[in-house]
Amino acid sequence: MARIIKKEDYNAKRNEILDIALKLIYSKGYEKMSIQDILDGLQISKGAFYHYFDSKQALLEALVERAGKEAAQSLLPIVKDPNLSALQKFRRYFELSINWKTMQKDLIIKLLSVWYSDENAIIRQKMISATLKQTPGFFEPIIRQGIEEKVFTTFFPEQAAIIITGIALNLADTLTDLWLSPTSDSSRFTKTDMILDAYFDSIERILGAPSGSLKCFGADAFKDWLTEEQSNIKSK
């Protein structure tokens, strides 16, 4: 007779496997991580692992799905808040992003170069693909609200949501490339501010939003941990 596992216990153990898998991905890369690494880390049998995931690919897909759900949980309250205007909702989204990076500063500093290594190219691409599918669904209702409020003039809310999602992803990659490059602090801060100005301006133009209405932070928001990251790179 098969052993019956409570749903809460099942989900807890499944998340435990996902947690250690994510740690291993950051420490050695998805390509180099093996199922045996997970078994050793949790002291579980191969049969126990396969009770939750039938392959390494299934594990990867579960990590991507969980990340998407976590992002949705943070974005949905913003989208549904009846007390926020469309401009406020967009700004709140950007502020949420920078606040998360600030709270996770130490983790980000340690993981940036690892996350962008060749060993994590597959999972990084999976995450990007999932974001490109999911995030426009959160942006579109905000854009439609902005059109109703007459602060956005775009005729293409659905397409604008897709384009802005791509811009946001590209911004993250562009800034990461800059921050990991061996340039002076003053040069990186100047370029970061210029990049942010350009990207926010592009988003405002796509939406037909008032100039300067969406930019809610500049390079100073990253100053502390950018300086620390550059110090870490120079010491390697």
Image (tube, grey):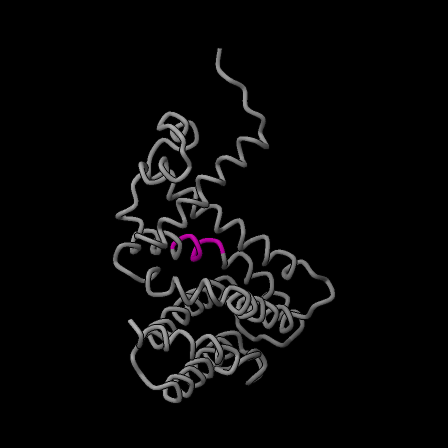
Q: Please name whichever residue, 79 or 49, is drawn nearer the observer in this view of the structure.
A: 49
Q: Given the current orientation, which residue lies at the most extreme right position?
A: 83
Horizontally, is 42 left or right of 70 in the view?
Answer: left
Is residue 124 one of those drawn in magenta?
A: no
Please tell me how many numbered marks the rendered image carries: 0
Tell me where residue 90 appears, x and y as whole percent.
58, 70
Q: Please name whichever residue, 144 or 137, is drawn nearer the observer in this view of the structure.
A: 137
First to last magenta residue range: 129-134
Compared to residue 83, the image places residue 9 above or below, namely above
Horizontally, is 193 left or right of 187 in the view?
Answer: right
> In this orientation, does residue 147 appear?
no
Image quadrant occupied by the C terminus = bottom left
Compared to residue 48, the image places residue 138 above or below, namely below
Tell me where residue 65 appears, x and y as whole percent.
46, 46
What's the residue at 62%, 77% (across, down)?
A: 151
Tell me where residue 35 appears, x and y as whole percent.
32, 37
Horizontally, is 130 left or right of 102 in the view?
Answer: left
Quarter of the rendering containing residue 194: bottom left
Quarter of the rendering containing residue 55: top left
Q: Please name whichever residue, 135 or 146, is drawn nearer the observer in this view of the structure.
A: 135
Compared to residue 231, the image places residue 69 above or below, namely above
Tell me where residue 176 appears, x and y as whole percent.
37, 71
What's the residue at 35%, 28% (across, down)?
A: 46
> In this orientation, does residue 39 appear?
yes
What's the residue at 56%, 31% (across, down)?
A: 9
Quarter of the rendering containing residue 143: bottom right
Is residue 132 one of those drawn in magenta?
A: yes
Q: Please name whichever residue, 58 or 224, is drawn nearer the observer in this view of the structure.
A: 224
Q: Main secondary structure of the magenta part?
A: helix
